[in-house]
Image: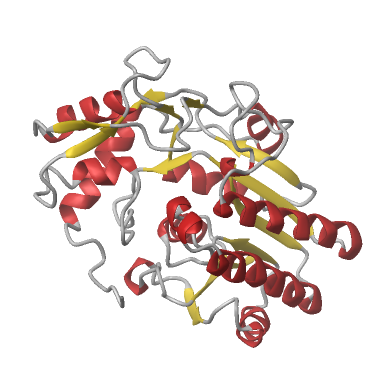
Amino acid sequence: MKVLVAGGAGYIGSVTTEMLCDAGHEVSVFDNLERGHRAAIDPRAQFIQGDLRRPETIEAALKESGAEAVIHFAAYIEVGESMRDPLPFFENNVSGSLNLMKAMVAAGCKKLIFSSTCATYGTPEKMPMDETLPQKPESVYGESKLLCEKIFQWAEQIHGVECVFLRYFNACGATEKYGEDHSPETHLIPLILQVPLGQREKIFIFGDDYDTPDGTCIRDYIHIRDLAQAHILALKPGISGAFNLGNGDGYSVKEVIDVAREVTGHPIPADLEPRRAGDCTRLISDSAKAREILGWKPEYADLRSIVESAWNWHQSHPAGYGDRSE
């Protein structure tokens, strides 16, 4: 297929682009490079620079690429930032998505894979989390993604654009070529790995009095390769609706740190800090629907494989992509 990847210079977008190219798809990447990296775009893909907040640029990109489907990653993602400065999240994530859908309708592009999040659920009423849970986001980031889902649902009902919502848990890991490089970094595994890289002295654990075996929060970590594969599977015609993506196994903060110590051979000092507001005790996915309907099966589910892949990439890219424009 001809696939346009919006936000393809970002972390998940770069790996999805790589795997789309490996699978023989004709890929165009649309990105403004505000938070992505030019070096993260697979050279086999066409690069079109533009911004979803400027409708004329996405209209031109859809025309130039002849896209039959769009995979949409372009968004601000940091929860804490969204609570400090909410309006840019609505402008970029929601208005940008509205502009994208309007352009898709005008271009006759009938398939959208949307990068959503388990943050649309808020604090879950049951565990593991499936798609029947009520969506009650507790952050501006989660709210912005839910608003996008609602826009796309109406576009599907009225304009016939087939929409898939992939609600991620904790994306992590790397391929040999592409990995995680955010500024600032807020995700646990790359933050831990900054210690053996000599970029920080220690890691902080926020609370060890949760109702878990070791007292620290438990999260569902999913390898970036497995996450990207789900997007490719979702391109099949006739598939729409929401799918949770996670391994269904949870690891605690202390477990992740311990595995990183084994993988890197570094002691990785850890200091205990008070709990952070809003941290849930346990977030684990029920991904049975994705396995059944998409035919999705995670291949890199064990934590050691995830951390090893991230460590290998960070060792070969200690400064990330080194092309920051900030």
Q: Residue 144 sits in which quadrant? A: bottom right
The one of 104 and 55 positioned closer to us in this rendering: 55
Q: Residue at x 39, y 72 (%)?
A: 43
Extreme-top residue of the structure = 213
Q: Residue 206 sits in which quadrant? A: top left
| Up/down of 215 relative to 151, above or below | above
Name the spot of residue 193 as percent of width and height, x first.
20, 43
| Up/down of 62 relative to 164, above or below | below
Q: Residue at x 48, y 25 (%)?
A: 282
The one of 85 and 246 positioned closer to us in this rendering: 85
The one of 266 and 123 positioned closer to us in this rendering: 123
Q: Residue at x 33, y 54 (%)?
A: 180
Name the spot of residue 300 as percent of width and height, x first.
41, 33
Q: Residue at x 65, y 87 (%)?
A: 56
| Up/down of 224 relative to 261, above or below | below
Q: Is residue 315 left or right of residue 111?
A: left
The quarter of the rendered structure image containing the C terminus is bottom left
In this figure, which colouring scheme has been used for the structure?
Answer: secondary structure
